Image: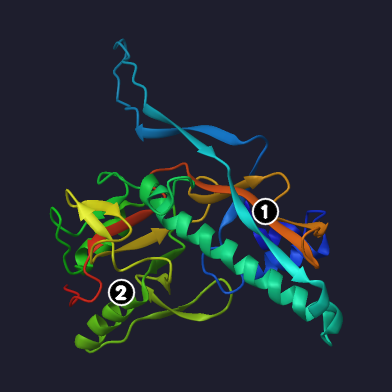
Amino acid sequence: MALTLTEGELYSTTDILSRTVIDRLVKDDPILMRLGFDTILGNSDTFVTVTTRSGAGVYEVGDTWTESTPSVGIDTVVLKILGGDADVDNFLLETRSNKLDLKGTVLNDKTLAVKELYLDLFYYGTAFDSTGFAGLHQKMTSTTYNTVNEGTTATESVLNISNLRSAIDLIRGFQPDIMVMSRLMRRSLATYFDSIGDKMPGVIDKFGKQVSSFDGIPIFPSDHITDTETIESSTFSARTGGTSTTIFILTFDSSAACGVQGSTGLKVVPLGELETKDASRYRIKWYCAMKMKNLRSCAKVDGVDPDGTVAA
């Protein structure tokens, strides 16, 4: 069972400083609050994904049985090193009235930087940084299993509600947890409901908050999903350079959208006093990535015009 970062703290020997950083990392983020993380012993994990199921048949007595096997693919998730160094000035630490506040401010800023980098990679992966890990856009490329192309060739199109429902129906064997889109896309969806004399339905999410929803799936905006995506051959090709966006329907599970990390998790390492300046250095490091074992566990609609009039 994959535990969220917050749940994992309860079973770990993580030091107090690292726990504080983890709490800040997941705070108020719809992905990191829900995303489970599997631990990898080593630097990678290789697993089998079923691309086509095997068949079955009805047989009479004495019939010859026909063998059939599923078509499978091999996927490998490789841990990447995310992090950064932060210096705490000794003079400021000594002369400020609240010593913890300065260190907290510096580490909080670095934590937010790591958080934003992980989320950019979570959605866009190597399309955001070629040295990063594969993200959702690289995991979901099949129009048979998990992708609906709203656009045509290199031109985006307004969102059709029927296509959004088609994307939801691509998910088999899982109950979607959330739907994530850009803020502009969410406003356009809300405008659609206003235009038909209705309001966006609401649900109570797993944390007890009232949130907007679509077909019972909670909707959350993300600043990490751009409205400048490029499509090519009717499908997503780049994070920037165009005027389209993507809507993701996600399930969080060890076999669905799941984070992976090294055995030590996220760590804050005090590096000590510096030789060249009057400061102490701290390093926040995280060996991490993401995976999606089941191709039908999540879905997306790409090539959407985010500020276009949503159509039925």
Q: Which of 290 and 296 is in front in this view?
A: 290
- Whether residue 223 is visible here, answered yes or no, is yes
Reading the image, the residue beneath label 1 is 285
Q: In the drawing, what numbered circle is on residue 133?
A: none
Specify whether 32 is left or right of 164.
right
Graded by Cα atoms within 10 Å as few (under 14), some (14 to 19) or many (20 or more), the crowding at tag 1 reads: some
Q: In the drawing, what numbered circle is on residue 185?
A: 2
Look at 37% across and 46% down and name the residue there.
138
Disc 1 residue type (three-letter): Lys
Q: Nearer the viewer, residue 185 or 121?
A: 121
**Residue 175 placement (x, y as % from top left):** 44, 57
SS assignment at label 1: strand
Instruction: Determine the image quadrant of residue 43.
Output: top right
Look at 52% across and 65% down and name the residue there.
116
Disc 2 residue type (three-letter): Met
**Residue 281 placement (x, y as % from top left):** 76, 61
Marks 1 and 2 sit apart, C-alpha to C-alpha, by 33 Å
Specify whether 250 is left or right of 83.
left
Q: Are marks 1 and 2 in contact (CB under 8 Å)?
A: no
The earlier-in-sequence mark between 1 and 2 is 2
**Residue 204 placement (x, y as % from top left):** 50, 78
**Residue 244 placement (x, y as % from top left):** 24, 65
